[in-house]
Amino acid sequence: MSVKVRVPGKVNLALRVGARREDGYHELATIFQAVSLYDEVEASLGEGVTCEMLGTQAHLVQVGDNNLAVRAACLLAERFNVTDGVHLVIDKRIPVAGGMAGGSADAAAALLACARLWGVDASFEDLVSLGATLGADVPFALMGGCALGQGRGEVLTPVLSRGTYSWVLAFAHQGLSTPAVFRTLDDMQERVPESMRLASHPPMPADVMRALTTGDPTILAPTLVNDLHAPALALAPSLATTIRAGQEAGALAALLSGSGPTIAFLVSDEYAATDLAVNLSSQGVAREVRVVSGPVSGATVIEEK
């Protein structure tokens, strides 16, 4: 028997960051949108917990005990006293270290696939709770759609969103480490006057939430914001060239996805998305360019056999 789950990546329409907490993390206020770029995770019965990675960036991902999907399977087995093993095959399309929560998506998919494979009596809330212990983005990968994330991003509230939004994603040639981006943000904070530093609690992105209720990308575009933009560009200055190319080609907005380095360009519709994707591809300003839309559903079982 095997179970295959499809799980989306995400774009942060707003990512507001608070000052560093005593535990080293930052308080966040973020608006997630799940988009139609998917990893697929297939779980089949096996000995122990093993993992196999497919895709053009497979060589960049460890498949041992530190892999987040492997950890998810082990955690589920421990919590529900499962003695069966599992072999996970991950078809990776969400960029590695790209700011789109690909690792978290795979963990979410592994939780859902293994629960179904093993016949575990786990509710959606159980999976979300387990996911939150693995990573801040795992609960949203299970939920999908649009949501407000608080805390480290794991405390979720669904957000009303009308319509479908078209995006062009530009994948960078090299990934960015999320901890490195936050460390750079902290370093930058130490060099600015205290009056300009981040507050303990970041502002709520209310304007983004209001814009989402209109279903109009031209209203949403000017509200998009990411407080990690400056530190990410400090670590990867070439991203400025990609952003400028998209803006000059007519994108409504250019947004760093999460901690980067993926750049998400919001456009008016799918036809504008195709035109922009062709333009960016011809300029060679990204490793790969993809057209996606959102919001879409979270982790979903697509095959059982």
Image (cartoon, rainbow, N blue to C red):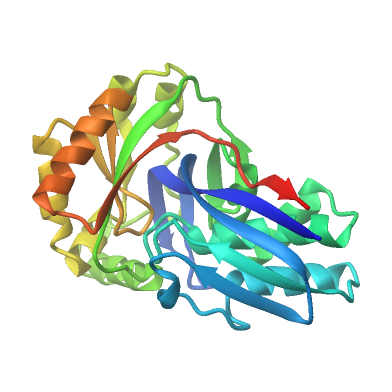
Residue at 64% from the left image edge and 48% from the top image edge = 142
In which quadrant of the rendered view does residue 284 lie? bottom left
Look at the image and tell me whether residue 86 can be seen: yes
The picture places residue 5, in percent across and down from the top left corner, at 66, 52
Residue 11's image quarter? top left
Give residue 29's position: percent from left, percent from top.
47, 46
**Along the line of sight, the residue nearer the viewer: 119 or 244:** 119
Q: Is residue 123 left or right of residue 247?
A: right
Question: In the rendered view, would you say 47 is above or below 283?
Answer: below
- Is residue 193 among what the camera can see? no
Q: Which quarter of the rendering shows the N terminus?
A: bottom right
Q: Compared with residue 198, is residue 189 higher up or lower down, i.e. above or below?
A: below
* Near-viewer residue (133 or 195): 133
- On the image, the x and y values in percent for residue 208 come to 40, 30
Tell me where residue 177 appears, x and y as whole percent.
Answer: 36, 71
Left or right? Give the position of 293 relative to 63. Answer: left
In this rendering, would 127 be left or right of 39? right
- Answer with the quarter of the image where residue 248 lies: top left
Q: Is residue 172 above or below residue 50?
A: above
Q: Residue at x 41, y 45 (%)?
A: 12
Q: Across the whole image, how many numbered discs are drawn on residues?
A: 0
- The residue positioned 44% from the left and 56% from the top of the image is 94
Which is more toward the observer, 38 or 163?
A: 38
Q: Residue lying farthest front?
A: 305
Q: Residue at x 79, y 81 (%)?
A: 47
